[in-house]
Image: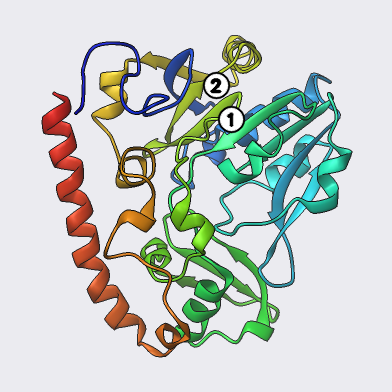
């Protein structure tokens, strides 16, 4: 039963986990907002590096080989800008994790950030995560759009204006339509069982709110200070919001993961066998509409109950 009283009353640890405040915020740099988000993570990394508050940051940046994303350290603001943008892949930090210290910022998905809960780090910047697309899904999507994998130089997983931007080795670029729904068919068992959408182990958790604006969940004193300093320096603008404000924009990943126990509980979404790679893209797209309609009904049911 959804209760309206209390700060964060839903579930054993609350629907959003432990937090100090909720914000909507955006970077004051318009070039960082064109991807549809608020540009908060890149702005914070550049700000912390410029001020000498961190020496490096562990991030997922771009790569010239599949899956065109890799774990790396960045040490300068230009490198932070170059690494901007979502990479819809689960990239292991591996041996790089042992090089993280108290002067290092870590950016990651809930499964990545959780590994640093007891390790020293300057700040943990957590990304919201729905259901991640596997490498099989990316390979399927490119092949279905007649893109030769050997010819790909770079993928912009979340291109300005939406969809995917593929840069080929011959210099040509291809824009492909939105594809997030493919994760319903191409995800890993670990992603299906994950129940953390809002990155509950981060110092600051950041996700989309509306075009060019992000939700920022301040979870710790460290996160609170970094956000306040960036706002005071004019690098970020933001407004504190209430839990009601946040839940009025509740999304299906939030409900499916943190309220309903993960996508594994959704009878329409399962890890499929290899046969799914032989189904035409248009057929999977057609079927995804029924899944999305179901999720929209769940959202509306939740909002009516919450109010």
Name the residue nearer the viewer: 172 or 165: 165
Query: How many labels sit on residues?
Result: 2
**Where's residue 122, x and y in %?**
76, 23
Q: Nearer the viewer, mark 1 or mark 2?
A: 1
Please tell me the numbered disc located at residue 160.
none
Question: Callout 2 environment at 10 Å: few (<14), some (14 to 19), or many (20+)?
Answer: many
**Where's residue 110, x and y in %?**
56, 41
**Where's residue 38, x and y in %?**
48, 34
Q: Is residue 56 visible?
A: yes
Helix or strand or loop: what does disc 2 sit on? strand
User: Label 1: which residue?
Assistant: 201
Helix or strand or loop: what does disc 1 sit on? loop
Q: Is residue 158 visible?
A: no
Task: Give the CA separation, mark 1 to mark 2.
Answer: 23 Å
**Where's residue 119, x and y in %?**
78, 30
Q: Earlier in the sequence, mark 1 or mark 2?
A: 1
Please tell me the numbered disc located at residue 236.
2
Position of residue 154 relative to residue 275, above or below, is above
Q: Tell me the quarter of the picture where residue 250 sits.
A: top left
In the displayed structure image, the side of residue 215 where residue 286 appears, left or right: left
């Amino acid at each position: 039963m959804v209760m309206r009283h209390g700060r964060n009353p839903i579930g054993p640890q609350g629907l959003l986990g432990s937090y100090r405040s909720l914000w909507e915020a955006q970077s004051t740099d318009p070039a960082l907002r064109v991807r549809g988000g608020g540009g908060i993570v890149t702005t914070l990394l550049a700000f912390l590096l410029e001020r000498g508050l961190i020496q490096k940051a562990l991030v997922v940046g771009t790569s010239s080989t599949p899956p065109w994303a890799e774990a790396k350290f960045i040490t300068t603001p230009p490198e932070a800008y170059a690494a901007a943008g979502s990479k819809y892949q689960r990239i292991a930090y591996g041996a790089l994790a042992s090089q993280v210290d108290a002067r290092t910022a870590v950016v990651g998905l809930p499964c990545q950030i959780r590994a640093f809960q007891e390790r020293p780090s300057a700040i943990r910047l957590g990304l919201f995560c729905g259901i991640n697309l596997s490498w099989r899904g990316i390979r399927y999507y490119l092949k279905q759009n007649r893109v030769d994998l050997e010819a790909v130089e770079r993928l912009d997983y979340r291109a300005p204006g939406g969809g995917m931007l593929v840069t080929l080795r011959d210099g040509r670029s291809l824009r492909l339509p939105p594809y997030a729904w493919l994760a319903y068919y191409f995800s890993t068992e670990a992603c299906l069982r994950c129940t953390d959408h809002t990155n509950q182990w981060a110092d600051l958790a950041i996700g989309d709110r509306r075009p060019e604006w992000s939700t920022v969940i301040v979870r710790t004193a460290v996160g609170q200070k970094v956000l306040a300093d960036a706002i005071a320096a004019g690098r970020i603008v933001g407004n504190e919001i209430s839990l009601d404000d946040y839940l009025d924009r509740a999304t299906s990943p939030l409900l499916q993961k943190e309220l309903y126990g993960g996508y594994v509980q959704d009878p329409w979404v399962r890890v499929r066998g290899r046969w799914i790679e032989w189904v035409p893209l248009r057929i999977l797209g057609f079927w995804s509409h029924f899944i999305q309609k179901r999720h929209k009904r769940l959202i509306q049911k939740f909002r009516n109950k919450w109010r």
